[in-house]
Image (tube, rainbow, N blue to C red):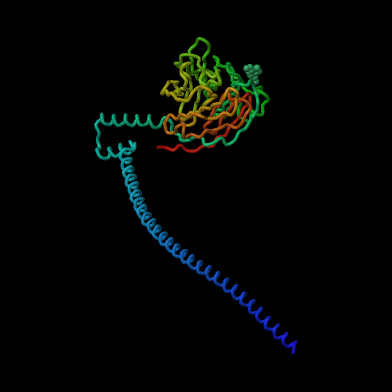
Amino acid sequence: MKPAVVLLVSTAWTLTSAQYYYQGLMDYLENRLLAIEDRMEMWHVQSHRYHTELQDFSKLTAETMDGIRKDHKVIHKDLEGAAARVEHVEREMDYVETQTSPRACVRKADKVLEQGAWSVEERREEEEEEEDWEKVHSVSDCVDIISSIKSVKILKRVGSPKGMWTKDPRSSKVYVFNGTAGDRVYQFTSVLDFSTSPGVSSSRQIRLPSVWSGPGSAVYNGYLYYINHEDDTDMQVVKFDLLGGSVTDITIFPVESHAPVYSLNPETVADLVADDEGLWLLYATSDSEPNINLAKMDSDTLDIEQMWDTSCPRENAEAAFIICGTVYVVYNTRLASRSRVQCVFDVNDVLVSEEAPLLYFPRRYGAHASLKYNPEEKQLYGWDDGYQIIYRLSMKRKLLI
Ligand SMILES: *[C@@H]1O[C@H](CO)[C@@H](O)[C@H](O)[C@H]1NC(C)=O
């Protein structure tokens, strides 16, 4: 009996303790569930808020987009209006141009047809008009300007550090002027003859009746043009027939002093250029005049036709050359660095300095004593510290107005 009671009691006890255990577990689970519910509720509220906020935002975006679209339409319309106005102005410009373009020849021809017979006076007026027009617009007829220096060829080294060499475009003969003054010129039959001959021994020596002053001579079509400017004499331009061996003309050029045209080459009293368009002279009027001056001369008679102030400074100028009526002035520094074309003057006023390319010469030994342009070959004959150098140039066409 006793063990049965003990069992019963112990079972009851076990039961109650189990009940407690489960009750606690249930409470715990319930609490957890409540907490989860609370969090779910909170999450629900939050997500609802987010949702409405998102809705508001998308509404706002849609409105803004609408506004932008409307603005865009307005801008587009404005632009269309502006384009139409530009077109209108362009048409007006075209019209003005056709009214004012200098087509003297065309108009003259029209008049001949219209009027048939002219009075002599009218005709003369018309001709004068045309002459003026010619003078203003076509001092130079060709239209090449330099675009770059294509290549350089160092031919040989002969003579003094300073000197000049050039080739007659018409005869292909080469002329060498050694030093900065003299009465002798060396003539070679070709560039090849010059480059293969030892020194100047195989050349034909030409004795001049007077001294050439400075490396600024020019040879064109069998004639040598040189400057004679010795102490206490006027500056002369001499034309010498290389074939006949005699002076054919002399003119006095009106300058006040011995001021050199290029400050870095004080021996160059003036620089002559001869080409298809005649004879050009680069010179300085006086010591106080800071710019290089240019004169156009008749190559037959040595008459002075026109004079310009190029507004290119003489200071730090080393040399200059002329292509199609455009003067290119080459500058350097006293301690020779790289030569560069830094000033340009166009007698036709088509090309301005700002538009011309700043052109650098390849690195060299010293400084150019002279640079002579050959229009047939489009290359420069340079004398650089006793080296004879050929620069080949690339050309482009001048933009004509
Ligand atoms: C060039 O001239 C210099 C003097 O200026 C002279 O010493 C030299 O011999 C001349 N050279 C030639 C090749 O004539």
Residue 296 visible in the current orientation: no
Above or below, 274 relative to 38: above
Q: Position of residue 373 (x, y in %)?
A: 53, 29
Q: Residue at x 46, y 18 (%)?
A: 289
Report the front residue among 307 and 42: 42
Report the front residue among 189 and 163: 163
Q: Position of residue 346 (x, y in %)?
A: 45, 30
Report the front residue among 396 and 23: 23
The single residue placed furthest to the top in the displayed view is 232
Work out which quarter of the rendered image holds the N terminus and state it: bottom right
Report the front residue among 13 and 41: 13
Horizontally, residue 277 falls left or right of residue 365, namely left
Q: Residue at x 42, y 23 (%)?
A: 307
Horizontally, residue 150 falls left or right of residue 11, namely left
Quadrant of the picture in which ligand 1 is shown: top right
Quadrant of residue 200 in the image? top right
The single residue placed furthest to the bottom in the displayed view is 1
Above or below, 170 relative to 114: above
Quadrant of residue 400 in the image? top left
Q: Position of residue 326 (x, y in %)?
A: 47, 30
Above or below, 79 relative to 151: below
Q: Position of residue 171 (x, y in %)?
A: 55, 29
Residue 357 visible in the current orientation: yes
